[in-house]
Image: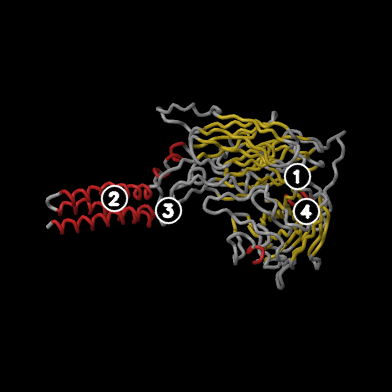
Amino acid sequence: MTVARAVRCRVLLVAGLWTLLVSAGMAPAFADSAAAGADVSVAQSLGDRELTIVLRRVTSVPGPLRVDVVTHAGTAAGDLTLAATPTGALGSGSRLPAPGVPTAEAVVRLGGTPGMYSATLDMDRPGPWELAIGDGVRVARIPFVVPEQVTSPPERLVYGGFLVAGALLPVSVLLAMRARRSGWALLPAGGMVAGMAVSVTAALLSASLPLPPQPGGQLDPTVDNVTDPYSVPQPMISDFSRPPVLLTVEAGTVPAGRPSDFDLVLIDAATGALVDDLLVHDSALMHLLVVGPSGGLSHLHPIRTGPGRYQVHMTAPEPGRYALSAELARRGGGVQMARAATGLTVTPGGASAAPQSPSAPLHLGSGDTSASMVVDGNRITVRTTAAVAGTPTTITAEVGDTADLQPWLGMVGHLIMAGPVPEADTDIAAAVHNSAIWGHAHSMGPTTMQAMGDMPGMGGAHNMSEMTGTHDMSGMDGGKAAAGRGVMLMPPINGESPPDETVAAYGPDVPFTFTFPVAGRYRLWIQAERNYTVLTIPVVLDVAAAQGAHR
């Protein structure tokens, strides 16, 4: 009898040790827990400064929020004031300061050299926040969310099961050694096995369970749904759609050649209410494309001054009517491109010095497949495949001869297009305003197998393309980019953050692939960043009709 009891004790002891070893080696199920997310990059045209504001991820609350400000060539030195204000309502028992009042402030001192300048703010709570950035004249207000490190229900089951198994292990051993009836030891042993079964099952199933609607991405963020996103009932059909946005312009007198401000107002097309649910899309709340009568393009990022209101600061180079188009993403409304029906009227500047006219565009198409120009001291060559309507066309800009381009707005290059436009029209803004097509394509850099093989962990990778709303997210050049001509900017995964503008390792080839739906003449502007300077390359492209098609 004594021998049998000793054997049972050894068996239970081995089973308990096996349980602990398995639980120690089992990774917790983080697949559907609310992650802190990646860094948030927001471009801002704050007065005469074109800035990129990078909000680094907050890993714990209370905790620090690091704010990096990237400046570009020509940015004036000076101080920027930062003020972080919580905007979500608190519970009645909270001892934290009331929302609506800044709880953290700092100053960023910008130098005369373009680059990155930083400051740190202390976050005292999770939930929705607003970051105010002031230059002494204007204040930009950027909404953002400080996440809570939330334990998901499957993760709680994993930990709970391990806790039960660990607590019952010594009970099983003790009963096996002390109890007169060894059968009593089977009860805690059974509970231990049940706890392990629950833990293993929850860990295996957690990866297949859907995430709850994400505050700030799919839901309007509040303190409640940020701190406990799993308390939100998940609908059987996730439909967060919202109406399109109407873009209106509120402008006083905007004279040519003089710095001026005007306001943009975003209106809900269904209710007429102000729209204040824009998402950071391609590193900006809004991308404003402004085309002048002579064909010059301004790619600006208006500052948010209040709910549904944005302010634009620009120096219009010439009088006339300008075409305006805003690209934005609304929470639940997808990516939208909204045109201002009235455009922007710029009056003559009187005694102001006449600004320089934009560079003459390169002309491609109709047999011409390559052309070159110099932009801000950079030698640029643009090549194109045969441009035929309905067929993918690859347009590649070679910027310099070294791989030192910087990612701007999260991409290596941008291609903005409008058309078809009349071939003899001298008022480009009017032609673009009335054109049927506005497009915006992105380049992630060369995608040759050799170039991608040089990237860590990317040997043998394939070309990638992503279509989103009005975008043709490209970077595919059919393998025709020169081998070894730089690397491809890979999109972040698993909450990682993309490279910022301090990384100069891309290009010199910047390829785009776009399918022009109809034949005709198009106005194109290619943009890439080098040495903290955004280069704009104007191109006129003639797209031929497909054989057998009628124009």
Q: Amino acid at mark 2?
A: Ala
Q: Amino acid at mark 4?
A: Ile
Q: Label 4 vs label 2: CA separation? A: 66 Å
Label 3 CA crowd tier, 10 Å (few <14, some 14–19, many 20+): few
Which of pointers 1 and 4 indicates the residue nearer the eye?
4
Sooner in the amino-acid sequence: mark 3 or mark 2: 2
For disc 1, the marked residue is: 322
For disc 2, the marked residue is: 165
Q: Could you tell me residue 496's position as x and y percent?
A: 55, 50
Helix, strand or loop at mark 3 = loop
| Residue 171 to residue 96: above or below | below
| Residue 551 to residue 156: above or below | below
Q: Could you tell me residue 305's position as x and y percent?
A: 63, 34
**Which label was assigned to residue 537?**
4
Q: Label 3 vs label 1: CA separation? A: 46 Å
Label 2 CA crowd tier, 10 Å (few <14, some 14–19, many 20+): many
Which of pointers 4 and 2 indicates the residue nearer the eye?
2
Q: Label 4 vs label 3: CA separation? A: 44 Å
Helix, strand or loop at mark 4 = strand
Sooner in the amino-acid sequence: mark 1 or mark 4: 1
Q: Report the residue at 38% width, 57% height from top.
A: 204
**Which label was assigned to residue 210?**
3
- Looking at the rendering, in which quadrant would you find the C terminus? bottom right
Tell me which corner region of the image, top left, top right, bottom left or bottom right, holds residue 266: top right
Helix, strand or loop at mark 1 = strand
Look at the numbered discs 1 and 4 and tell me whether their residues touch, using CB distance below 8 Å: no
| Residue 385 to residue 265: above or below | below
Label 1 CA crowd tier, 10 Å (few <14, some 14–19, many 20+): many
